[in-house]
Image: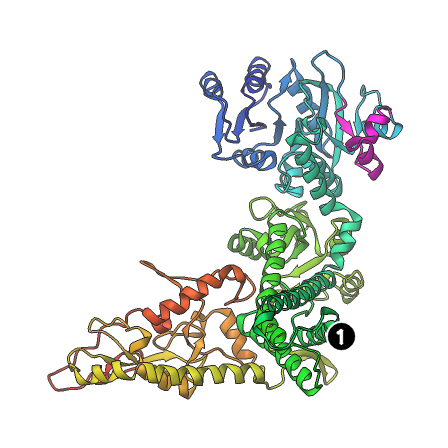
Amino acid sequence: MKLAIVIVNYNTSGDLERCLESLTAYPPNCAHEIVVVDNASSEPGLAAVQEKHPAVRWILNSENLGYARGANLGLGSIQAAYYLVLNPDIVAQPGAIDSLLAFADSHPKAGIIGPQLLNEDGSVQDSCRRFYTFKTLLLRRTLLGKILPRSRTVDEHLMRDFDHASVRPVDWVLGGCLLVRRSALERTGPMDERFFLYFEDVDWCYRMWQAGYEVLYTPDARFAHRHRRDSAKGALHRGFWLHLTSLISFYEKWGMLVYLVKRWREPLVVFLLWAVDMLALWGAFLLAYGLRYLANPLFPAPLFPLSAYRSLLLFASLLTTLTFLLAGRYRVGRRRQATSFAARLQQVGTVSLLLLASTYLGRQEAISRAVLLLFVPIFAVMTALGEDLFRALRRRLERGYFSLERTLLVGDPARLQRWLDRIRDCRRLGIDPVGYVAEPPAAGDAALPPLGAGEVPWLGRWTDLIETVKKWRISQVVFWRRPTLDTLSGHELVQLRRLRIRIRWRIDDAWLVAAGARPDSFGGEVSALLEPGTGSWLHSLLVRLLSLASGCVVAVVAALPYVWLRWRRRPQAGDIREVTYQAGLDRTATLRLVCQQDGTVRPLLWQWPLAVGLLRGQLDVWGDRLRLGAETRAALDPATAAAFWRGGSRKPGLTGPWAGVRSASGWVHLPADDDHDATFSFATSWFILKSIVATLVGDPGGIGRVPPLTPPSSPGQPHSRSPGRYSEHV
C-alpha cells in the first residue's frame, strides 16, 4: 500500500465528518486506507460518523491518550510507503493528495512534507515555522506579545518574510497536515509520546533534520485548515497549560542548558539529597524541642532557650554529613537504589550514638537530654520520609519523561530487541533510549529497522559513534559487547570520557563490580582485583545480635506450645519435620519445622525449633524466603548472587519482602526497584508491618506447606532422608 491516512479525533465529530467527506470526494489515485483513532470522545455524533463511513478503519481508545500516542497507534496499525497525518479540522482540496505524493516521489531526501494550508477565507496560513528562540517565546507566550503584536522576531518565526509560493526547506511545519516517508519514520522513530498535545510536530521535524532528512514545504498541494489556536486563548484555557507543559518537555529534551545540567545530574542529585537530609535533621530537632516545650510542666528543670543549641545543631549537621558520606549514602551513581531498612538503621543509629556520646563526654550542661532522646526517633522517621518523598518526586518526573537520561544503545540488534521486550518501559530505569548503533549485516545496507515498538531507531554505525553522541545530546552509552579495535578504537573511548559520557557495559564479568572489584595493573595488563572481604562488620554484628535476641524470645514464647506438642505427639502425624533448604549458592543445610498433619507450617508461636536456627546463625529475622530442596544457582535472584560475591550472602529470614499478603497464587511480593531488592520506604512501611504480623500468625519462612512425607517401603522402616525429601523427626 502506498498511502495510509491517519486521523486523531477527540470530541470534534463535526470537523471529522467534513474531513472524511473531503477524502471520499477527492481520494488519492493510489492504493490507500484511512485510519481514525478516537481518544474516548464523549460527543454523541461520533456513532453517526462511523455509520456513514464503514470503509474507514476505526481505533476506539478507552481513554484520552493524547495526540502523539493516538497518532502512533494509527501509524503502527498499517504498513504503507507514506503516512498522511491529519487533524480532523483539515479539508482536502481536489488533487491535493496526489500532488503531495508526486512531490514526495520527486524529493527522496524529504522526510516530512508540509503542504500549503488555507484559512477558511482562502488566505494562506502561516504553516511553516522557524524553531523557537527565547525571544520568540517571550513575544508569543507573554504580555509582550500584546504590546508588540507585529514584532520582527515573531514575523521571522512565522516565516512571514517568505511568500509561501515556492518550495523551500523549513525548520518545521504544523502537525495538522504532514506527509511522512516510511523510511524516514524508521530512522527517527514515531512521534514522541511525552508530548500529550503540542510540540510533537516540532520535535518530529527536529529529529528529521538530525537524522539527515529534510523538512520541505510545497505550495503545490493545498488543504483547508480550521486553525483554532487554543494555546493562545490565555492562562485560563486548558490548551495554554498543555502548550506550556509540552514546551518545557521540548527544552528538557533538546535545550543545551538542560543538557549541560543533565551531564552533571549525579552531583546535583547528591546535593539535593544532602539538602533534604539537612532539612530532616533541623526539622526533627525543632519538632523534638517543641514537644519538650509542651511537656515543660512535667520536668523539674527549665528548658534552655533555642539559641543554646546552635552549636549542637552545627555539630550534628557536620556529623550527619560525614557519617552518611562514609556509609555510602551519597555515593555518585547509586542514587537509584533505595536505602535498605538495615542500612537506614545503621546510618541513623550511628549518628544518634555519636551525638549522644559527644554530649555526655563533652559535659554539655546546657542541653536537654529529653530533647536529644526525642530527636533520635523523629530524625529516623523524617530521614526516611524525606528520602522517600525525594525518590517519589524523581519517579514522578521520570514517568512524565522529565529528568530521563538520554541513552544510546550499542550492540547486536537481536540482543537489544530481547532486552527492550523484557524491560518494556525504560522509564523505570530512568533512561530515554534515543536510538541504537550497530553494523548492518551487509556493507550495502542503508539502514537497520527500529527496535522496541518502533521507538528506538537505528542512528548509525560504530564509526559514527562520537558524531551520534554529539548530535543527539547523549549522556550515557550502553555497550552490549566489549568494544574491540575492529569496532571502536581506544581514542574514541577517550573522547567519550572527555565528553563526560557515562559508559556502561553489559558483560559477563559484571559480577566483579558487584563484588567490589577495583581496576588494577598486573604484568603490564589491565585487570580487576577482588580482595577477600566479609561485608560490613557493623551491619553483620547488628544483624547477629538481633538474631540472638529474637532466638531467645522465640525460645521462651514457644516453649509451652512445643512441650504440649511433644506431650500429645502422634507418630503418624509428623508434627516436627526436618527439611533441606538452600543455605547459599553452593551448599544446603537442614532445619526443623513444626507442621500440621497436612504439611502446613504452623505459625511462629509454635516454632520452638526455629529458636535453635536463630541462635546458631542459620536464620535471620529479615531475609530471603526459605528455599526448600537443593535449588540451583540459576534459581536465585541476582541480588542474592551479588550479596554472596560481596561476602555478605543473605540468610533465610523469618520474614522479608516476600511476606505481607497471601493470595491463592502465593505470596504477593513487596514492590522493589529494578536495580535492587528488599527496599524499605515510607510508602511500604504498612506492607512490612503486615509482613511481620503474617509471620507471627501465619507462615515463618514463606514455605506455606511442605510436600507429603515419603511413605515407608514397609511397616517399621524409617522414612527416606534423600536430598530434597522431608523426614519425620518425631
Q: Residues within 10 Å of mark 1 (few under 14, many from 20)?
A: few
Q: How many numbered tags mark residues here?
A: 1
Q: Which of 274 and 631 is in front in this view?
A: 274
Relative side of 40 to 388, left or right:
left
Q: Nearer the viewer, residue 97 or 273?
A: 273
Q: What residue type is labelled 1?
A: Ser
Q: State whether residue 99 is above or below residue 216.
A: above
Which scheme is used to colour this image of the protein? rainbow
Could you say where residue 604 lies in the image, as x and y percent from the top left? 33, 75
Residue 143 magenta: yes
Which residue is identified by label 1? Answer: 311
Q: Which of 401 and 220 is in front in this view?
A: 401
Q: In which quarter of the image is residue 73?
A: top right
Q: In which quarter of the image is the N terminus?
A: top right
Could you say where residue 378 lies in the image, as x and y percent from the top left? 58, 68
Q: State whether residue 306 is above or below residue 77.
A: below
Q: In which quarter of the image is residue 270?
A: bottom right
Relative side of 155 to 714, left or right:
right
Relative side of 468 to 21, left or right:
right
Could you say where residue 91 lies in the image, as x and y percent from the top left? 63, 17
Q: Which of 146 and 19 is in front in this view?
A: 146
Residue positioned 77% across, 64% down in the render: 497
Could you say where residue 493 lies in the image, as x and y percent from the top left? 76, 64
Res. 614 visible in picture: yes
**Residue at disc 1, secondary structure:** helix
Q: In which quarter of the image is the C terminus?
A: bottom left
Q: State whether residue 664 is above or below residue 448.
A: below
Residue 22 magenta: no
Residue range corresponding to the magenta coloring? 126-150
